[in-house]
Image (tube, rainbow, N blue to C red):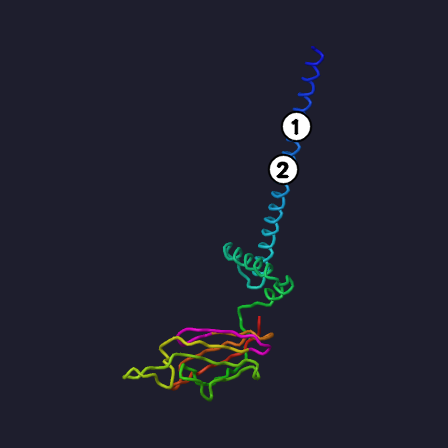
C-alpha cells in the first residue's frame, strides 16, 4: 500500500517537474526571441545614428556649416524612404555628393507662347516644345464668359489651368493652379525650370531655363 502511494507520488512529482521544465523551456525560448528582437532594434538604431552622423558630416563638408539636428533627421528619413522605394544607395550617394547651393544653368532661357485649350475645343498653336522637342507643353483651362453668360473662345486666366509636360520616353509631368506657375521637369542630367504666365488673350507665355541636375 505504502509502496503504491510512494510510486504515485513520485509519478506525480515527475510529471509536475517535466511540465515545469517544459514551461520554463518555453519561457526561455520566448525571452530569447524578445532579446533577439531588442538586439535587432538596437542594431537598427545604431545604424540610423551612424547614417545620420555620416550624412551630417557629408552635408557639413559640402556646405561648410553645421546642420540642425532636426534637419539631419529629416534627411535621414528621406534617405530611408528612397532606399525603401528601391533607389540604390549608390544613386543616393551620387545625388547628395553632387548637390550644391549654386545652380549651374545655361546663360539664356527660351520663351515661347501657346494657346490654352478649353471645353470649346482645341485649336492650332496649342503646344510648344523644349529640350530639342523632348519636352512638349500643353495646357487646358476654363473658357471665359461674356456679359451674356456665353463662353468665349479663350480661357479665363483668373481660373486654375492644368499644365501637362509630355517627356520623351512616354513619361508625363503635370502642374495645375492659377497662373503664374513655376514647375520643373527633370530629363537625364538636366532640370528644365519653367515659368508660365498669362499672355495675350487666349495665350500662355512659358519660359524654359535648363540647369544641371542634380
| Near-viewer residue (159 or 15) | 15
Q: Quadrant of residue 61?
A: bottom right
Q: Quadrant of residue 199?
A: bottom left
Q: Is residue 186 left or right of residue 155?
A: right
Mark 1 residue crowding within 10 angstroms, few (<14) / some (14–19) / many (20+) = few
Q: Which residue is mark 1?
A: 19
| Near-viewer residue (107 or 31) | 31
Residue 134 location, x and y as percent?
57, 81
- The quarter of the image holding the N terminus is top right
Residue at 53% of width from left, 81% of height from top? 136
Vertical placement of residue 34 versus 127, above or below: above
SS at mark 1? helix
**Span colored in magenta:** 167-182
Name, please, the residue furthest toward the bottom.
124
Taking the magenta stretch, the answer to whether it contains residue 39 is no
| Near-viewer residue (212 or 84) | 84
Q: Which residue is mark 2?
A: 30
Residue 29 location, x and y as percent?
65, 37
Count of number-bearing discs: 2
Residue 16 location, x and y as percent?
65, 24
Name, please, the residue furthest toward the top.
1
SS at mark 2? helix
Vertical placement of residue 128 versus 16, above or below: below
Q: Earlier in the sequence, mark 1 or mark 2?
A: 1
| Near-viewer residue (130 or 53) | 130
Q: Is residue 16 left or right of residue 135?
A: right
Between the C-alphas of marks 1 and 2, the distance is: 16 Å
Vertical placement of residue 34 versus 156, above or below: above
Amino acid at each position: 500500500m505504502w509502496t503504491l502511494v510512494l510510486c504515485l507520488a513520485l509519478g506525480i512529482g515527475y510529471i509536475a517537474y517535466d511540465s515545469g521544465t517544459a514551461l520554463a523551456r518555453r519561457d526561455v525560448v520566448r525571452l530569447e526571441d524578445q532579446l533577439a528582437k531588442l538586439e535587432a532594434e538596437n542594431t537598427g538604431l545604431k545604424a540610423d545614428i551612424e547614417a545620420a552622423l555620416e550624412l551630417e558630416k557629408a552635408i557639413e563638408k559640402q556646405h561648410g556649416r553645421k546642420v540642425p539636428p532636426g534637419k539631419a533627421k529629416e534627411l535621414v528619413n528621406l534617405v530611408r524612404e528612397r532606399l525603401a522605394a528601391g533607389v540604390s544607395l549608390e544613386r543616393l550617394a551620387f545625388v547628395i555628393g553632387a548637390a550644391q547651393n549654386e545652380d549651374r544653368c545655361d546663360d539664356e532661357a527660351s520663351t515661347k507662347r501657346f494657346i490654352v485649350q478649353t471645353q470649346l475645343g482645341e485649336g492650332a498653336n496649342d503646344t510648344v516644345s523644349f529640350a530639342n522637342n523632348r519636352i512638349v507643353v500643353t495646357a487646358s483651362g476654363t473658357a471665359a464668359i461674356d456679359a451674356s453668360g456665353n463662353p468665349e473662345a479663350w480661357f479665363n486666366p483668373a481660373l486654375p489651368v492644368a499644365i501637362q509636360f509630355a517627356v520623351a520616353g512616354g513619361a508625363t509631368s503635370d502642374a495645375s493652379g492659377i497662373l503664374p506657375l513655376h514647375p520643373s521637369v527633370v530629363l537625364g542630367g538636366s532640370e528644365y525650370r519653367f515659368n508660365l504666365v498669362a499672355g495675350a488673350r487666349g495665350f500662355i507665355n512659358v519660359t524654359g531655363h535648363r540647369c544641371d541636375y542634380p
